[in-house]
Each structure stands twice: as C-alpha cells, then as structure tokens.
Amino acid sequence: MADDLESAAMIDRDQVLHVARLSRLRLSEDEIGTMVGELSGILEHVDRIGNLDLEGVEPTSHVVALENVLRADEPWESLPRDVALAQAPEPQDGAFRAPSPQAE
Amino acid sequence: MKDLLDLTALEAHEAMVAGDLGAEEYTAAWREAAAGDELNAYLWRDEGGEEAAAIAVERDCVAPIAVKDIFTTEGVPTTAGSRILEGYRPPYTSTAVRKLLEAGAPVLGKTNMDEFAMGSSNENSAYGPVLNPWDRERVPGGSSGGSAAVVAGGLAPWAIGTDTGGSIRQPAAFCGIVGLKPTYGAISRYGMIAFASSLDQCGPLTRTVSDAALLLGILQGRDPLDSTSVGLEGGVSLPDREDLSGLRFGVPAELGHDEYDSGVRAVFEQTLKRIEALGGEIAEVSLPSSEHGISAYYVIAPAEASSNLARYDGVRYGMRAGGDGDLIEMYETTRSEGFGPEVKRRIMLGTYALSSGYYEAYYGQAQKVRTRIAQDFDGAFSKVDFVVTPTAPSVAFKLGEKTDDPLAMYLNDFFTVPMSLAGIPAISIPAGLAEPEGGGPQLPVGFQIAAPAFAEQRLLDAAYALEQGLSFEARPGGADG
C-alpha cells in the first residue's frame, strides 16, 4: 500500500496548497508531503466510481422521503446575549471580537 | 439478586420500579465503578459537583448512562475529542441527552472518541486512545470507542454513541457488546455535533438487545429542533420473540472471502447455522453496488464534514490562536493548531471533492452510487426480511497497526458503510470469539443484521431471538492488564 501512495499522483503539491487555502488550513512542509501521498492513495481508490456508468441515475442527497417541514412563524425564546457570548474567545461590548480582515 | 453491576439496565430499571433497588445506591455504585477507568474511556465523569447539577435528572432513575462526548450537555465540557473544543461548555443540551434526563437516566460521564467522530480505532482522539477492555494493546474500534469500552469494561451499564459509517456497530463488535444504528431520522440530531449530516445518527451501545430496545424507545421521536427527524411510529416495545421461524436472512452473494479474516468467517458461518436451527431461512441476495460503498462514503462524508467544520473559526466559541495577525491568519492558525491529522485530511479531501472542476466527478457520482446502493437493498428486502454480514472484517486490531495507512483504516468500514448510505437500521450483536490473524487470545466477533427503514421493531425482535440462541456470555478477562 505504501508503494501505491508514493507512486500515485492523483493530486500534486500545488493542488494540495490550493485546497489547504480553500480549507483555511496552514500545512507544515511535512504535512504537505504526507498529504500529497495520502490524498493520492485515497483518491485513487475513490476514483473507481468515476468509471461506473450511472447515466440517468438520480443522485441521493437525503435518504428519508420528506416533504418540506414547515412550522408556524412564532417567536420563541433564544439564547440570551451573555450566554451566547460566554464561550467566545474574545467577547467585547456585547459582540464577538475578531481581528481585522486586513493586515495593518 | 445479582451483584448490582451485573444487572442489565433493564433488570436494574425493573428492580427500581418494583422498589427492590434504590436509585441513589445504584447510581453511586456506577459512579464508583466509572471512577476506576483505566482505559482512558471517559473524558469527563460525574463526581457530584456543580457541573453535574446542571444536567440533573427530572424523575426516578432508569439507569445512569455514558454519553459520547459529541452530544452537547449544558455546562458540562463537550469536546468531540478535539483540541479545538477543549474547555467548551455548551449553553444548551442535545435532544438525545434531554430525553435521557427526562426518562431518569443521569449522565454518568462523557466518553472519549475519535476527533469529530472521524476514525475506526479511537486513535484519532486529541485526548489519547481508548484501550480495548479485552486486550489493552488493542483498539476498541471507533469512533464511539469510549462508549463501547465503558459498557464492555464494566464502567457503565449502557451508553449512547453516533454512527456515520459504522461508528456504533464496529466498536460494539470489537468490544463484544450490542450496538444499534437506527434508521436515519429515528432520533433527533439536535445538539449532536455534526460530522456528515446526511449520515450521522445517534444510537445505543448496550450489553443486551433488550437494553438497546429500552434505550431506543427513550431516544426516538420527532423533534421540532431537527426537521430531518421523524421518529419511530408506534414507539419501541421490549423484544420477546423466541425463534426465527418464517424469517428470511439474506447473505450478499458479493461477500467474497478476501474481505475478512478466517476467524471472523468461522463465527459468521456458525451464526448462520444457528439462525437455521432457530427456524430462520438463509438465502442469497445481491448487493452489487455495495463494493463501491467505501468510495462513495469517503467522498460524501468528507464533503459534508468540510462544510460542517467550517464553523470552527476561533470567533464564537472554542479555541483561538494567532489572534495578533489579520483575520485569515487567525482562522488558519486556529484551525491548524486545533484540528488533528485525520480531521485535516478529511477537510482537505472534502474540499477537493467539492471544488470547481471535480464536483460532478466525485460528489455527483458518489450521490448516484448512493442511490444504487439503496436500490440494491430495496431489491434484497423484496425477497428477504434481513440482510446479514459480519460487522467488521477482523477482530480488534493492535494500537498503531493501521495509523500509518488511512486507506487500510477506511476499509474497516466495508460492511457497515452501505447501510449508512442507504439510511437503514442495522444492529451488531456479539456472536462468538475468534483468534486474531497472527495469533493471540480470542476476541469478540460481531454479527450485523440490517433491516428496511423504520423496521427497528422487527430487527430488535429477530436480534433478540438470535441473541438468546447464541447465548454469548464471554466477558473481558484481563481486567488487571
């Protein structure tokens, strides 16, 4: 199996870096190398379904046949502000504080 | 009466109802037993402090319960096995736990698990692996490994877990107990920390089928807070079926011998004979698409996970790191330090599968395979009442044996994933013991029975009759190491 992982090239270093950026993950050099090998191995296995002829088969996104579930639009109690903020890493002035989107 | 801790949850409940057993005495005995956890199975235990008061029971005791640390419990630490939620105390309680409390089942403790329920060995927990009570050098299975280990190891009378691709059934099999994954929608997912929302389902891990039925009866039901929940019409009765006459059990023709160990095969074949001795009929069924289950699952589940786990961003709750930089830097530092390797791998896999240019080839195709797998089961159930397989391809493997090979770890879910993709209920019951490949003391083997959606009562009745016929009574022997 280890040989397969090394020889397969389903996903390369640049793609791994691109996907990491989309995922908001910062990978170390070691992690990038491991990720290229492991994801390639997994994708090679997963890729078998790519060759199946599934023309005309309906995709399943939900297994239980449910119609839209509706309820009356009535207000109910929600979490008090202080409770909602109690677990925040850096609450301030009754709000969630986050760093600026733009570097200073 | 038997020793308190030898009573099944049902027996204890009945003794309490009859007035022969005091709820306080019984709960205290279990608290003391849980305090002796040497398996790293509990992440939090009720020691009678303030935290426990926050989730106190509302009536007389059924039996205290161990709860997988993926269920939110107000004021009580809830980590989902992740560093990113270390110290998190949710402001609300999940519906499953609320129902337990209302029924009189206090939370004995929160159990260790693979991080965000991603894993088949419990080695992906940020808080260290759980040890298998049968052999402490082996894994208890996963991701509900802590819940399985506490029940098998005499640290809790019963437990709940979650099953996305086998995470209740496989650890139940590895630990020699009963594990039930109900139909998708049978139990509310409200307050169950999301991994793959179209697959995640809560369920019981118990010593007996009757305990599983009692627990399912408490947990099931439609919940206005989970619009995908529908409950089980008519509720759940305790099973009392004595034989299997008139019932047909389908064995998939595609069940090649390559997929599982010879010891597992021997127990599986003996169990089929036992079914026939109990009056059941064995027939062959065809599930041709099931061999693609793992591929479809490892596209769909990571895709949903990559979306669900976007919420861990260091802003509203949980860990924050790198807060001195800009917003993106904070996000990336928090997530890179907070998530473990398997969670990162699945987020990457899911993000890739959903990314522009690959969506149809992976996610779209996997959803079609899912349809085919469900159609296969529909076809099988037109001929038989149940589909049966081994629960896992092997007995419990050694710690560290598969950690370097994620694909080998994923293939462990071979027998359990198809039912998850089809949304149907399946139960694993302990059927016998087998030597691991490579030798060593005998370990439990699970037998999986799957039924059509919402046929839980029939499934439990049949599993009960088979359980009585098998009379599996082995217990972990190596309590001292």
Image (cartoon, coloured by chain):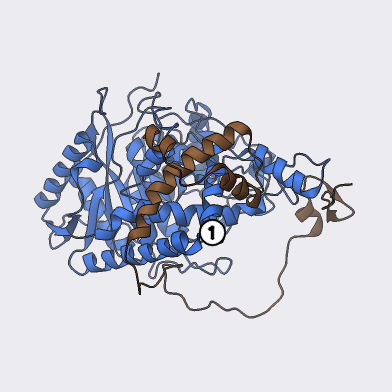
Chain colours: A brown, B blue
Question: What residue is rendered at 29% in x and 36% in y?
Answer: B394
State the SS at label 1. helix
Work out whether residue B239 can be spotted.
Answer: no
Q: Is residue B107 left or right of residue A103?
A: left
Which one is nearer the viewer's eye here, B44 or B125? Answer: B125
Question: What residue is rendered at 19% in x and 35% in y?
Answer: B262
- Within 10 Å of disc 1 (Cα), the crowding (few <14, some 14-19, many 20+) is many
The percent position of residue B281, horizontal first and vertical second, equals 11, 57
Which one is nearer the viewer's eye here, B438 or B35? Answer: B438
The percent position of residue A54, horizontal first and vertical second, equals 34, 68
Q: Which part of the image, by quadrant, shows the N terminus of chain B?
A: top left
- Residue, disc 1: B354
Residue B451, picture quadrant: bottom left
From what the image shows, is residue B443 above or below residue A19? above
Question: What residue is rendered at 20% in x and 53% in y?
Answer: B254
Which one is nearer the viewer's eye here, B350 or B60? Answer: B350
The percent position of residue A76, horizontal first and vertical second, equals 71, 71
The percent position of residue B433, horizontal first and vertical second, equals 23, 33
Name, please, the residue furthest toward the bottom: A72
Question: What residue is rendered at 20% in x and 60% in y?
Answer: B286
From what the image shows, is residue B390 above or below residue B361? above
Work out whether residue B315 can be spotted.
Answer: yes
Q: Is residue A19 left or right of residue B248?
A: right
From what the image shows, is residue B391 above or below residue B421? above
The three-letter code of the residue at mark 1 reads: Leu
